[in-house]
Amino acid sequence: MSARRLQDLLLLLVAALLVLPVLAIFGSWLQWDGRSAQILGEMAGTVLPGYAWTSLGLCVVVGAGVALVGGAAAAAVTLFDFPGRRTFEWALLLPLAMPAYVVAYAYTDYLQFSGPMQTWLRATFGLEGRVLPEVRSVGGAALVFIFSLYPYVYLLARTALGERAGHLMEAARLLGAPLRRRIRQVAMPLARPAIAAGVALALMETLADFGVSSYFGIQTFTTGIYKAWLAMDNRIAAAQLATLLLIVVASLLALERRAQKRLRFAAPRGTRAGSAEAQPIALRGGRLAMAWAVCGLPVLLGFVLPVLFMLRPLAADWSVLPWDRFVQWSFNSVRLGVISAVLAVSIAMLLAFSLRRAPDAVTRGAVQLAALGYAVPGAVIVVGLLLPVGWLQEAAPRAGVGGWVTATVLGVVWAYLVRFVSVALQSVQSGYSRIPGSFDDSARMLGAAGFAMLARVHWPLLRRSSAAAALLVFVDVMKELPATLVLRPFNTDTLAVVAYQLARDERLGEAALPSLALVLVGLIPVMLLSRTLRSRP
């Protein structure tokens, strides 16, 4: 078999394995039976409208919240100059290191009825009963998502405003427009596509969430999928519900891509974000205090306070913490992260190299199919993986296919690859964009073709991009909850799973240790991202 044919075969095989869960979800409609129809009919008449309205209401509030918080913070650090602006530029990214379910645990531990805040208020002011509103509610979940996910909007809006708004704002000032009008009619229209793209990403994360909604007892569409599958024991009904969620997520993904395309317009020649004609506006007095509040409040609520709330039980009593088991949980998380990162980068290299070598319709289609996974919620991936496994198990019960997927790390790593190969692919393709095509022509003239070109020419130039890709996949795997919770083998608890289980059992003090470990791991890509943004001209 020639090297080219082997490469094409590997490409098709990888694409098929990565897209199989999505195809299985849609294929579930071909296996319509009476029991699944009965379950869906009963759910449609009872709980399904509630799931849909709860998810819709949560998305509306979260979308408006992240647009307001992220857009205002981006405008403040980009268009204005005030003491502390440089610090806020990177500090506003810190909530990216906090998984939303960890933020939920932290606030619940501190603000619940028996928590320190309400206990202190009752003792100090002589109050009785509940003092603060219930944290575990749709409103509480919306606040958790807003202050965990606003960096998506902040990051994109800041980039858009930093590249385009400065010189146009200055031109509007020279034409006599006051500051309020410049912001309303110049800056915000420029940032609107970026804000729309960031809101779409935040809503995709909200719909894909399982940890917050499950812990708060909120009946969202994702929890409905798990109930149809686990409580009602019908994987066909669960898959058909997952199809509806997948369609909504695909619509949000299309909205995000459309908004990203609208960002592709250039600034006039000779203008730079840091030129003398486009300097940020200095703030003083009341406007300075407002800028501090706009930038400081999200950092405080999204990162500082949750970390302090989790450090409190650690400082109070170290003896209650499961230090002996913490090492095993960390080892399991790191092992799964390393395996998944190595495989994801290898697959991404194969996909990107195939696309560079032969950018035909088949190759582009295979790469696009393989990159769909990141937009698919973890709950949908789990159902999509176990559905064909169940079919194979019924067709060949002695083959033991189900055992290979659910009793070993194969199933959970497969789910990670379906979801996170696209993360590695973006980084590797970014590295490929900096390698001139003339390098490939020279390599062919010197006799290096096929995988020899990849190994001897491309790989040395892609090491930094591959390392960044591996790091991003590693961190995402460490924080992934739904797929790990369902597909992990026995005695393979990870930090994310243990944090969820301890919090669910109301052992929030013990949940602080694995939760803080996840936050520390999540800080690594945030620091790298902040450094990359500061190094841009």
Image (cartoon, rainbow, N blue to C red):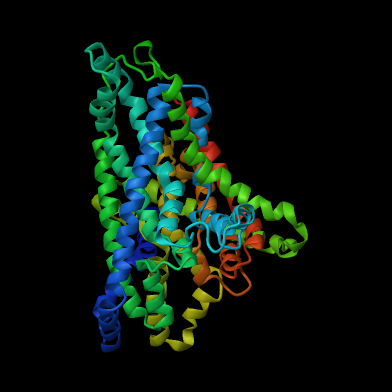
Say if 500 sits above or below 158 in the image.
below
In percent of width and height, residue 253 lies at 29, 52
Say if 259 sits above or below 79 in the image.
below
Q: Could you tell me if residue 357 is visible in this image?
A: no
Q: Closest to the observer: 83 or 485?
A: 83
Q: Quadrant of residue 264?
A: top left
- Number of dots carrying numbers: 0
Q: Residue at x 75, y 57 (%)?
A: 317
Q: Residue at x 47, y 58 (%)?
A: 133
Q: Quadrant of the C terminus?
A: top left
In percent of width and height, residue 258 lies at 24, 44
| Image side of residue 126 versus residue 277, left or right | right
In percent of width and height, residue 522 lies at 55, 47
Say if 283 sits above or below 302 in the image.
above
Q: Closest to the observer: 84 or 526?
A: 84
Q: Could you tell me if residue 178 is visible in this image?
A: yes
Q: Residue at x 30, y 60 (%)?
A: 56
| Image side of residue 423 versus residue 35, left or right | right
Q: Quadrant of the N terminus?
A: bottom left
In percent of width and height, residue 131 lies at 52, 58
Most extreme residue toward the front, as rendered?
126
Say if 227 sits above or below 211 in the image.
below
Most extreme residue toward the right, as rendered?
319
